[in-house]
Image (cartoon, rainbow, N blue to C red):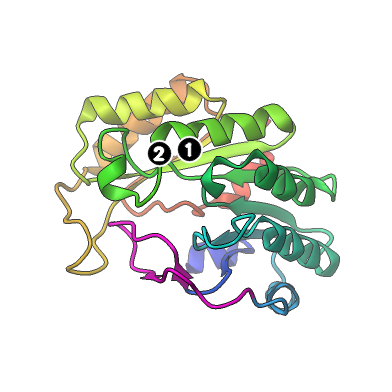
Amino acid sequence: MGDCWAAGTATFMILGNECTRACRFCDVKTAARPNPVDLDEPERLAEAAGLMGLKHVVITSVARDDLDDGGARHFARCLRAVRARLPGATLEVLVPDFLGSTESIAVVLEALLEGGKPAVFNHNVETCERLTPKIRSGAVYGRSLLLLKNAKQARPEIRTKTGMMLGLGETDDEILQTIRDARAHDVDILTLGQYLRPSSWNHEVVRYVTPQQFNELGAFARSLGFAHVESGPLVRSSYHAERGVSVP
């Protein structure tokens, strides 16, 4: 956290602290009907970002399948509020899958790119295809990849990004295939990190991947043409996120 904040980067989670899904890797509370959307949140978020003097702002959220747009319009409100407060900052979103809605993706992309600056659109595949039904509540591996590809095709000027947690029970070959799949779907930026179990309810840690293995996986990803890769045990989605806006 200190490393990121020192670089002028911070991540904010919007749309409440209750998620309509129950992913086995995540410790956020689950609710079929979370609290209503807080329409004052965009201004509070922008105020916090301004007080911190941020240079790169990452906005993520819980999944809100209860909303007709999955929360896309609220993402847009938050992006516009931050841009009004910090016009010099670059922006990044880490979005849920919006159940594959191209309309919701378009709403977020429009607001993300309004300032004309480099911007990052992130959606994490989290794990390999075989483990997705077990680990990611309500998610579909192919739908996540298609979401990323559709975003890139709709707005080629954005940098697309995805991330994977290792140690959930995937094989080495499955890691390599997931990396290949991401690149084949036009993903520009990749993060690879170690899964850590947040509670006894969550999925167990099946293995701890060594730093050397992370280095090798990072080198493999770069060989496929990713513009930027972060690969290490403590890497998370937003680690060194500001570097993603400087990729060609």
Q: Secondary structure at mark 1?
A: helix
Residue type at mark 2? Val
Residue at 78 percent across and 52 percent down: it is 111
Q: Is residue 144 left or right of residue 26?
A: right
Q: What amino acid is found at the position of numbered circle 1 in the picture?
A: Ser
Q: Quadrant of the C terminus?
A: top right
Kindly identify the residue that appears in the image at 70 percent across and 54 percent down: 91
Residue at point 30% right, 57% down? 25
Above or below for 69 versus 53: above
Viewer-proximal residue among 246 and 206: 206
Identify the residue position indicated by label 2 in the image.
140
* Image quadrant in which you'd find residue 72: bottom right
The span picked out in magenta is 18-37
Report the mark closest to the observer, 2 or 1: 2
Q: Residue at x 59, y 56 (%)?
A: 70
* Magenta stretch: includes residue 30: yes
- How many neighbours does mark 2 have within 10 angstroms: few (below 14), some (14-19), or many (20 or more)? some
